[in-house]
C-alpha cells in the first residue's frame, strides 16, 4: 500500500528538482493515479490508446497543474491488463526518452500479474514500496525476486536493476510499543538499501482529497520525508527522520492528553 | 489496560513474532525458489541409493520429512533396517 501515493509524490519531487518527468499509471482497469495527481477531468486518451495507435503519445500526456515539467500518462479504465503488450510499453518508454524526459516513473499495480510485470520490465531502478506488516514484506520479497529474473536488465544479463526499499505508513509509536516491525527489521529481512521511511499520516488523506501529491503539503512530515527520498535518490546524504517516537512524560501518560 | 501496565509498560511484542515468521518464510521461499520443499523426493531417492550400498533396505522403509518448529526446521529421516532374523 502506498505505491500510487509514492509515485505521485516522487515524480512531483523529481520535477520540483528540475527534471523533466513522466509518471505512468500501469494499473489498467483500476486507474487512480489521475485522481491522486488531480488531473482526472483532463483525461481524454490513455496509455492503452497510445499502445494501440489510437492516439499519439503527446495527445495522451497530461501536463501537471503544479509542476511545469511533469506529465501524467493515465491508465485505461475500460480495458484489461492484457492490453499492455511488451512491445507497446517499450515503444512508449523509448519515445519518452526521445522526447527528452529525464525520468519515467512507473506506478505499478498490486500483485504480480501483467501490469506489475510490465511496470518493472524496463526499469533501471526500482523503489519497492513496503508497509511494516507481514503480508506486505512477503509480497515485496517476491517482487524483488521477479525484478531479479524478469526485468530486461536481468534477461539481457546487464547490470541488475538498482533496488531501493521505501517503507511507508510507518508508525514510530507502534514500533516503540512492539506492535509494528521496525524499519531495521524490514531492512534486515529484505536486504535492500533503505531510501526512506514515510510516516503514517492524516495529511496523505488531505492530499488525495484535493488531488494534490502529498509532497506539496509544505511543512508536513510526509512532504518532508518524500523530499528526503528524492534527495537520496539523487545521491545526496539525508539523515533518516520521523522514525523515532518521543515518549510522553509520566504525567502525560497518567492524565492522557494527546 | 491497568494503571500498573500503563506505568511499567508490560508489552506483548507481536512485532517480534512477525519478524520471526517472516525470516522463516523468506528463507524458505528463497532456498527453494518459492516452490516449497520440493527437493524431498530427490533427497529420498539419493538416500536410498547410498544406504543400499551398505544395507539391503526396502525403499518404502526410508521416510523423509520436513517439519517446521517455531523458528527452525527439522529434517527427519527415518530408516527401518531389515529384520536381522529373516
Ligand atoms: N503515509 C501514509 N499515511 C496514511 N495513509 C497512507 C499513507 N500512504 C498511503 N496511504 C493510504 O493508503 C491507501 C492506499 O494508498 P495507495 O498509494 O493508493 O496504494 P497502492 O497504490 O499501493 O494501492 C490510500 O487510502 C492512501 O491514502
Ligand atoms: Mg495504486
Image (cartoon, coloured by chain):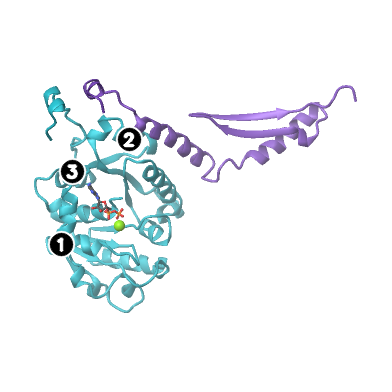
Looking at the image, the residue that sits furthest to the right is B86
Query: Mark 3 against mark 1, which lies toward the viewer?
Result: 3
Residue that badge 1 annotates:
A69
Q: Callout 3: residue from which chain? A: A
| Chain that the image shows in purple | B
Identify which residue, B69 or A49, lies in the foreground.
B69
Count how many numbered circles sit on residues in the image. 3
Q: Determine if residue A207 is in view.
A: yes
The residue located at (76%, 33%) in the rendering is B61
Whether labels 3 and 1 belong to a single chain: the reply is: yes
Q: Quadrant of ligand 2?
A: bottom left
Identify which residue, A252 or A206, lies in the foreground.
A252
Q: Position of residue A4 (x, y in %)?
A: 27, 56
Give the drawing colour for chain A.
cyan
- The answer to which quarter of the image holds residue B45 is top right
- The answer to which quarter of the image holds residue B18 is top left
Looking at the image, the residue that sits furthest to the front is B2
Mark 3 to mark 2 CA distance (whole Å): 19 Å
Q: Disc 3 or 1, which lies upstream in sequence?
A: 1
Whether labels 2 and 1 belong to a single chain: the reply is: yes
Whether pointer 3 and pointer 2 mark residues with C-beta atoms closer than 8 Å, the reply is no
**Neighbour class for label 3 at 10 Å: few (<14), some, many (≥20)?**
many
Amino acid at each position: 500500500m502506498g505505491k500510487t501515493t509514492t509515485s505521485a509524490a516522487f515524480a512531483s519531487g523529481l520535477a520540483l528538482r528540475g527534471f523533466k518527468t513522466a509518471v505512468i499509471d500501469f494499473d489498467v482497469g483500476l486507474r487512480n493515479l489521475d485522481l491522486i495527481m488531480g488531473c482526472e477531468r483532463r483525461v481524454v486518451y490513455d496509455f492503452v490508446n497510445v499502445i494501440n495507435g489510437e492516439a499519439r503519445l503527446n495527445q495522451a500526456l497530461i501536463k501537471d497543474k503544479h509542476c511545469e515539467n511533469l506529465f501524467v500518462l493515465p491508465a485505461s479504465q475500460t480495458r484489461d491488463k492484457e492490453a499492455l503488450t511488451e512491445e507497446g510499453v517499450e515503444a512508449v518508454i523509448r519515445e519518452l526518452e526521445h522526447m527528452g524526459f529525464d525520468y519515467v516513473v512507473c506506478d505499478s499495480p498490486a500483485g504480480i500479474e501483467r501490469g506489475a510485470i510490465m511496470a518493472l520490465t524496463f526499469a533501471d531502478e526500482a523503489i519497492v514500496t513496503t508497509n511494516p506488516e507481514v503480508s506486505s514484506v512477503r509480497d515485496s520479497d517476491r517482487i524483488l525476486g521477479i525484478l531479479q529474473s524478469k526485468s530486461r536488465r536481468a534477461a539481457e544479463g546487464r547490470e541488475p536493476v538498482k533496488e531501493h526499499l521505501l517503507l511507508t505508513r510507518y508508525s514510530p509509536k507502534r514500533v516503540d510499543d512492539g506492535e509494528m516491525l521496525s524499519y531495521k527489521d524490514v531492512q534486515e529481512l529484505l536486504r535492500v538499501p533503505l531510501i526512506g521511511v514515510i510516516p503514517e499520516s492524516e495529511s496523505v488523506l488531505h492530499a488525495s482529497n484535493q488531488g494534490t501529491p502529498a509532497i506539496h503539503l509544505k511543512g508536513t512530515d510526509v512532504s518532508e520525508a518524500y523530499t528526503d527520498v528524492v534527495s537520496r535518490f539523487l545521491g545526496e546524504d539525508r539523515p533518516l527522520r520521523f522514525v523515532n517516537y518521543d515518549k510522553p512524560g509520566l504525567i502525560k501518560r497518567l492524565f492522557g492528553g494527546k | 489496560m491497568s494503571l500498573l501496565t500503563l506505568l511499567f509498560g508490560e508489552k506483548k511484542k507481536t512485532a517480534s513474532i512477525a519478524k520471526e515468521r517472516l525470516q522463516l518464510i523468506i528463507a524458505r521461499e528463497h532456498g527453494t525458489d518459492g516452490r516449497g520443499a520440493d527437493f524431498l523426493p530427490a533427497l529420498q531417492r539419493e538416500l536410498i541409493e547410498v544406504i543400499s550400498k551398505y544395507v539391503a533396505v526396502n525403499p518404502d522403509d526410508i521416510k523423509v520429512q520436513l517439519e517446521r518448529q517455531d523458528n527452525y526446521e527439522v529434517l527427519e529421516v527415518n530408516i527401518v533396517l531389515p529384520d536381522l532374523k529373516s
